[in-house]
């Protein structure tokens, strides 16, 4: 009686050879933004060679047509900048080359910076630049000194890891494998492997400080272990096993095979069981000599995908603190919910969470309209 809901994001792929559409190096005056970005030096702009993967990921880029002066070039994680504090990081990412992420993604990013001032929050963008047309990115960076926006030096990040063969094989770039999703599944394990901390999807809102110890994963629906959020210390052996699993099990065209399914396989192995329902009943449960803990669904996934409307419905947020007293985050199920409006004055859970955790994004998003 397993119900599986698959929403396929159709990615239109156009592989262009050597079109004139190259990213030209950008040299805009940064007007003090470098400081706001939390970087000690200006982003390198002379060597923004378009990398091979950009042809597969960045064909939908919404960069064209925007005013150049509103584009902020980003330093690349691994090459230009690395986290200073091991295990004190939160990573979020946009692997689809959006230069202008939606308000909901910014709300997620802001929520982590807002609720966890003692953690460094990294928003990774494969676009390698961000549009500041509405001023929100620069506002957020100004208000949250713990927030960093960075590009990604994929070749360096993958080098010497179990997923490097898959990355180099380019098998993940064929259109029917949803390249941005597959890359994101690999990259989340990689950044935690290198730097340690928390990985969060951009449709998750942090609603209270993340005070759980690292080496944490959480149950989602049907006793599956979620991949939308997990937290590990750098060089944790389970991350290595996860990357080996992803490299081995990836099959082009099979949805979700290296997402929650991979994390669940690895946790089963660590716990020496195939019966995740029994584990769920014991949760929080620690396995492999206490090297990983799996928390109950109330912690990270309190509302399952089939109930996502609750987040948006009228008055559902009136007892927010009571209803979510055991939850650290809320997973908003963007794939299903992205066109469901968050209405102002509706007292929905989403509105309550956004007002609390992403006040700047919320006021920007509702500046000219009463929903977003
Ligand atoms: C997480 O796991 C690593 C590697 O096994 C270990 O060194 C570290 O102490 C663990 N952290 C916590 C908070 O248990
Ligand atoms: C779990 O299932 C797999 C594949 O069906 C099997 O190879 C493995 O031995 C099982 N593990 C346990 C602990 O039962
Ligand atoms: C389990 O962890 C303890 C202390 O962290 C360590 O002394 C012991 O050797 C570990 N056992 C195994 C089987 O790894
Ligand atoms: C949300 O509202 C819709 C439309 O009014 C209704 O059909 C649905 O059952 C509600 N769902 C939840 C979980 O409250």
Image (cartoon, grey):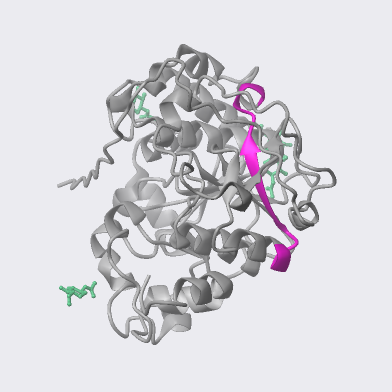
Residue 176 located left or right of residue 212: left
Query: Is residue 311 among what the camera can see?
Result: yes
Q: Quadrant of residue 31?
A: bottom right
Residue at the far right: name it.
40
Closer to us: 24 or 263: 24
Residue 214 image position (x, y, % from top left): 64, 50
Where's residue 208, x and y in %? 58, 70
The quarter of the picture showing ligand 3: top right
Q: Is residue 312 magenta?
A: no
Whether residue 226 is situated above or below residue 305 in the rendered picture: above
Which quadrant of the figure has residue 128?
A: top right
In this picture, residue 342 sits left or right of residue 75: left
- In the rendered image, residue 215, in percent from the top left (x then y), is placed at 61, 46
Q: Is residue 146 above or below residue 9?
A: below
**Residue at figure coordinates x 46%, y 71% from the top left:** 365
Q: Is residue 353 above or below residue 276?
A: below
- Side of 21 where 240 appears, left or right: right
- Rendered view: 337 above or below 59: below
């Amino acid at each position: 009686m397993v119900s599986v809901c698959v929403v396929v994001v159709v990615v239109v792929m156009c592989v262009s050879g050597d079109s004139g559409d190259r990213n030209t190096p950008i040299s805009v005056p940064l007007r003090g933004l470098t400081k706001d970005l939390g970087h000690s030096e200006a982003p390198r702009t002379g060597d923004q060679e378009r990398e091979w993967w950009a042809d597969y990921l960045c064909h939908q880029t919404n960069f064209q047509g925007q005013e150049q002066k509103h584009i902020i070039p980003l330093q690349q994680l691994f090459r230009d900048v690395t986290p200073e504090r091991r295990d004190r990081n939160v990573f979020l990412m946009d692997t689809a080359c959006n230069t202008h992420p939606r308000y909901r993604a910014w709300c997620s990013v802001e929520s982590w910076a807002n609720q966890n001032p003692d953690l460094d929050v990294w928003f990774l963008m494969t676009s390698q630049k961000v549009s500041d047309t509405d001023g929100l990115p620069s506002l957020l960076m100004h208000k949250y000194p713990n927030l960093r926006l960075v590009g990604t030096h994929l070749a360096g990040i993958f080098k010497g890891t179990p997923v490097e063969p898959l990355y180099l094989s380019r098998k993940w770039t064929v259109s029917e494998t949803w390249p941005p999703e597959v890359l994101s599944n690999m990259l989340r394990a990689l950044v935690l492997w290198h730097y340690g901390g928390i990985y969060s999807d951009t449709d998750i809102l942090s609603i209270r400080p993340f005070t759980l110890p690292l080496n944490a994963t959480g149950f989602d629906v049907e006793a599956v272990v979620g991949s939308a959020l997990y937290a590990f210390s750098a060089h944790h052996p389970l991350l290595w096993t996860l990357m080996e699993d992803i490299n081995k099990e990836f099959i082009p065209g099979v949805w979700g095979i290296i997402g929650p399914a991979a994390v669940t396989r690895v946790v089963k192995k660590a716990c020496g069981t195939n019966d995740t329902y029994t584990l769920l009943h014991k949760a929080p449960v620690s396995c492999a000599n206490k090297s990983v803990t799996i928390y109950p669904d109330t912690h990270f996934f309190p509302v399952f995908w089939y109930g996502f409307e609750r987040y948006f419905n009228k008055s559902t947020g009136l007892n927010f603190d009571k209803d979510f007293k055991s939850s650290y985050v809320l997973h908003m199920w963007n794939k299903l919910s992205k066109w469901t409006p968050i209405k102002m004055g509706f007292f929905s859970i989403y509105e309550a969470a956004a007002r609390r955790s992403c006040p700047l994004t919320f006021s920007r998003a509702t500046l000219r309209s009463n929903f977003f």
